Image (tube, helix red, strand yellow):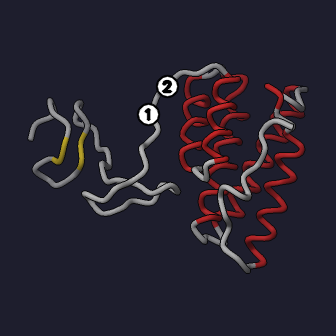
Amino acid sequence: MGSASAGRSVTGRDRDREGRARNARPRDGLGRPLPYGAAGVQRQPEGVVRTPPQTVAEAQELLDAGKPFHAHEVFEDAWKSGSEEERQLWRGLAQLAVGLTHSARGNRTGGPRLLRRGADAVEEWAAGAGQPEPYGMDLASLAGWARELAEAVERGGELVDAAAQSPRLRG
């Protein structure tokens, strides 16, 4: 199979139409790969340019639906397509979503680490930009949510329910 068509190459790796490696396996709501042929959750399209309010609204819908992995992809699009001045903000929000993803998957080390990294990033961005509530998001509250969840995950106990424990991006 050549690079002109999407699918599996002769090496067995999934490729997109341009020949770049892309994993075509279906995924569950937390982004975990499922076996080929299994019913999965529709993926977020990559490289979508949204306005910041559209980014926040779409990410919140995905978080509310228990799909923080997909919300991370929305934040990643903003981080990659947005202004240089806001990259740290969007990257930090993506880290919060990935931290929730890993926590919901039961990763008691990586989940808290990413939650704290994201919390630090959004707080640092807010302090440097002088914007504690960009696009209606209360970054101090988000950072507090992330640190509380990180502590709860590290203490153990119940598995994190991504939908029930997702943050409210806007107050």
Residue 130 horizontal side relative to residue 31, left or right: right
Q: Which amino acid is tagged 2?
A: Val
Residue 129 horizontal side relative to residue 52, left or right: right
Q: Position of residue 122 (x, y in %)?
A: 79, 40
Q: Position of residue 20 (x, y in %)?
A: 28, 38
Q: Which amino acid is tagged 1?
A: Pro
* Badge 2: residue crowd in 10 Å (few <14, some 14–19, many ≥20): some
Residue contact between numbered discs 2 and 1, judged by CB atoms under 8 Å: yes
Q: Kindly state the secondary structure of the residue where label 2 is placed.
A: loop
In 3D space, how far apart are the residues under numbered discs 2 and 1 (Cα atoms)? 7 Å
Residue, x 9% and y 41% (percent of image)? Answer: 1
> Which residue is more in the foreground, 44 or 150?
44
Q: Look at the picture and state if 120 lies above or below 4.
A: below
- What is the quadrant of residue 89 in the picture? top right
* Badge 1: residue crowd in 10 Å (few <14, some 14–19, many ≥20): few
Residue 72 horizontal side relative to residue 34, left or right: right
Q: Kindly state the secondary structure of the residue where label 1 is placed.
A: loop
> Which residue is more in the foreground, 107 or 30?
30
The residue that label 1 is drawn on is 45
Q: Position of residue 116 (x, y in %)?
A: 76, 56
- What is the quadrant of residue 28 in the picture? bottom left
Residue, x 45% and y 33% (percent of image)? Answer: 46
Residue, x 50% and y 55% (percent of image)? Answer: 29
Number of residue marks:
2
Query: Which numbered tag is attached to residue 55?
Result: none
Q: Quadrant of the C terminus?
A: top right
Residue, x 78% and y 78% (percent of image)? Answer: 155
The residue that label 2 is drawn on is 48
- What is the quadrant of residue 103 in the picture? bottom right
> Which residue is more in the foreground, 75 or 62?
62
